Image (tube, rainbow, N blue to C red):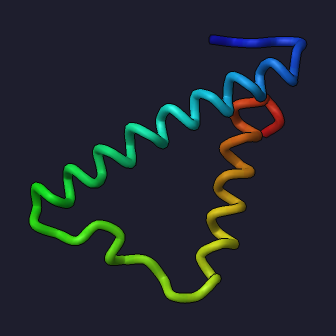
Amino acid sequence: MIVRGHRKLAAAYATYAMSVYSHYRYRSYIREMRAEGKTPWSYLHDDDQWLKTELRTKAQEIAFWTGQG
């Protein structure tokens, strides 16, 4: 879907699309890890340095979906 001229509607659709993708990707990830005999999320950091990259990535994603980037 392409939305032009209505940023709030575009942002709402982008948010919803990202939410649905995240939900199913999470479920797929858990299934993949269990199938491989691995522990999900074993790569997570124990400090807050990951947050900088995560916020930058999400900002780029939102900009893409809303035509800001």
Q: Nearer the viewer, residue 46 or 52?
A: 46
Q: Nearer the viewer, residue 61 or 40?
A: 40
In the image, 20: left or right of 55?
left
Which residue: 20% across, 52% down? 32
Quarter of the image where the C terminus is located: top right
Which residue: 56% across, 36% down? 19
**Position of residue 67 measured from the top left corner of the image (x, y, whole percent):** 79, 29
Which residue: 64% across, 68% down? 53
Residue 17 sits in which quadrant?
top right
**Position of residue 34 measured from the top left corner of the image (x, y, whole percent):** 15, 59
Quarter of the image where the N terminus is located: top right
Which residue: 35% across, 70% down? 41
Residue 26 sits above or below residue 55 on the image: above
Residue 64 sits in which quadrant?
top right
Residue 31 sits above or below residue 8 on the image: below
**Position of residue 16 measured from the top left corner of the image (x, y, whole percent):** 62, 28
In the image, 57: left or right of 26?
right
Residue 49 sits in which quadrant?
bottom right
Instruction: State the count of labels.
Output: 0
In the image, 8: left or right of 22?
right
Q: Which residue is most to the bottom? A: 47
**Position of residue 65 measured from the top left corner of the image (x, y, whole percent):** 70, 31
Residue 60 sits above or below residue 23 on the image: below
